[in-house]
Amino acid sequence: NIVTPDVMVERYGADATRMYTLFATSPDRELDWQDAGVEGVSRFLAKVYRFVALAPSADNDQPAGQAEELAPAARQLLRKLHQTIQRVTDDFGGRWHFNTSIAALMELMNACTAVQERALPAALLGEIQRAFVLLLHPFAPYLAHELWEKLGEQGSLLRVGWPEYDAALAREDEIEIAVQVNGKLRSRLLVPANTSDDAVRERALADERVRSSMNGKQVVKAIVVPGKLVNIVVR
């Protein structure tokens, strides 16, 4: 469908229009324009503005502290930040699927607003605000530059280095493992991320829902797909 960009820019702004075209579909597919989609992106950018410009920030030189020193909600938000940086960085590394990058930013913003009213350390809040603006810059450059100035930063964002993620901080403390019996999902396990395959296999075989679904049948083998699932074969 034919849409005049000038009308959308006048109504929603250049950033929202630009960001929607990147978010609505992947580069290899056609874009079916939806005005409601631009409105949604415009609301998201307004939420970003409130989070960065209206929330109290911290001194840029103030350290955020060690992850283990943070409260659970703050530690989870720090993990989400590094997961988002990793996800967007990977997308720019060759996939060029900007829609998934923008989706990751939206997920991070939802996580930020969910804990904003809690006791979030000011230094961590400042770290998240600055990293978020840097991640937003390729998609909404005008708003990003304005927010960068509101954070008290000097100079152009074009000269600021891309944020780096810490793989250790991005890693989940616990992961969910699906358990199948003869290919059918029977249970889910929540285990520490560093649990060995043998321990995961034992947990799966001992699970009450799994045992009841086997109806006394003999276990032929239990195949573990690390970090994802256990498939138990019975006969």
Image (spheres, grey):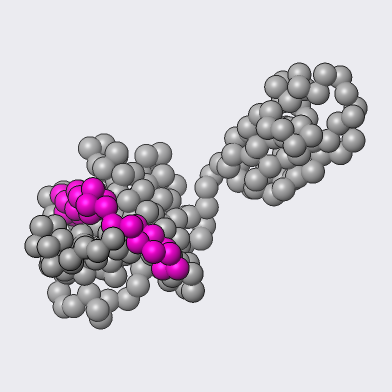
Q: Residue furthest front?
A: 1
Residue 30 within the segment the image draws in magenta? yes
Left or right: residue 173 versus residue 64 is right
Question: Magenta part of the protein: which range?
Answer: 24-52
Q: Could you tell me residue 156's position as x and y percent?
A: 18, 78
**Residue 104 spot, x, y in % from top left:** 39, 54
Query: Which of the pair 128/1 is nearer the observer?
Result: 1
Q: Residue 207, percent across and down?
A: 72, 25
Residue at the far bottom in the pictured view: 159
In the image, residue 217 sits, relative to residue 42, either above or below, namely: above
Is residue 82 something one can see in this rendering?
no
Query: For residue 136, which quarter of the picture?
Result: bottom left
Task: Point out residue 113 in the picture as x, y percentages from the top left corner.
Answer: 26, 42
Tell me the residue at 45%/60% (across/down). Answer: 87
Give the residue drawn at x 25%, y 57%.
129
Q: Is residue 161 visible?
A: yes
Q: Nearer the viewer, residue 146 or 14?
A: 14
Q: Residue at x 15, y 61 (%)?
A: 8
